[in-house]
Amino acid sequence: MNITKLLPLLLLIFLVSCNQSGKKKSDLRPTAGTNKAAMANLNLGIEYMRIGEYEKSLEKLDRARAADPDFSGTYNAYGLLYQAIERPDDAEKSFKKALKLNPSDSNTMNNYGRFLCEIDRSEEAEAILLRAAANPLYSTPEIAITNAGSCAFKKDRLADAERYFRQAIELNERNPTALLQMSQLSFDQKKHLSARAYLQRYLSVSRHNAASLWLGIQIENILGDKDALSSYKLSLKNNFPDSDEAQRLGKSGSGS
């Protein structure tokens, strides 16, 4: 998956960590010990990154670093930015710098692990993601475990992926990413009723996106609920007409 599609989720996680910085030592160094100018510019840099204004984001992150060169959160954000603009060497240097300044920052470990998975260094990715999840001060270990599952899934290690997704769901039964991944994994294993059940659980906690609608189309194509199938197709065409999934639907007609 393209990093630009992941940025909203990654930045949401990052912002949550920033907001909790005075409470969770594993996330970011307490705000009280950080220059206010650094925090203000960091937040602006994150916001510009979220909307795709990468040059402005870099400018604000540079200002944050100048105001406080030792704040790990800035380097974590640099890592995400460089990943987004496809500068992997700079991204890795930034994540490593953040962890050098704050070795127990599970938020950075999670982002670094996702980055490593994206560049096909899955063993390293999995190790650092599980390290992040094992931190007792990390408030959302299910996120890192889900990412470890996604990395295993990408490498067709289905048993490991399923184990991680189930563990993540046990920690948080409202984990949308793990639920959707379990639906896809179940479908790939031809467990179609299970795939439907996980997709329904996903929909109880999150909204449809193009990928979930396409999965629903594939599931109902096999299970034969014509009303659900028509609903999924219509929603995909109307709400995500420019998506790859909608283009595939247009070409195949049936969605198979």
Image (cartoon, helix red, strand yellow):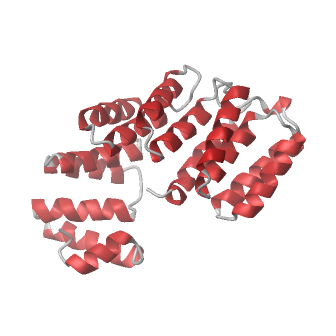
Q: Position of residue 132 (x, y in %)?
A: 53, 27
Q: Position of residue 167 (x, y in %)?
A: 35, 29
Please name the residue shown 42% across and 77% down the image: 242
Please name the residue shown 89% across and 42% down the image: 67
Please name the residue shown 25% across and 46% down the image: 185
Q: Position of residue 237 (x, y in %)?
A: 34, 77
Determine the image quadrant of residue 110.
top right
Q: Quadrant of the N terminus?
A: bottom left
Residue 16 located left or right of residue 5: right
Please name the residue shown 79% across and 34% down the image: 71
Residue 27 located left or right of residue 227: right
Along the viewing direction, whichever of 227 and 182 lies nearer the viewer: 182
Q: Is residue 63 above or below residue 209?
A: above
How many discs mark residues in the rendered view?
0
Q: Is residue 136 above or below residue 107?
A: above
Q: Quadrant of the C terminus?
A: bottom left
Q: Position of residue 105 (x, y in %)?
A: 64, 28
Residue 76 located left or right of residue 216: right
Along the viewing direction, whichever of 79 and 132 lies nearer the viewer: 79
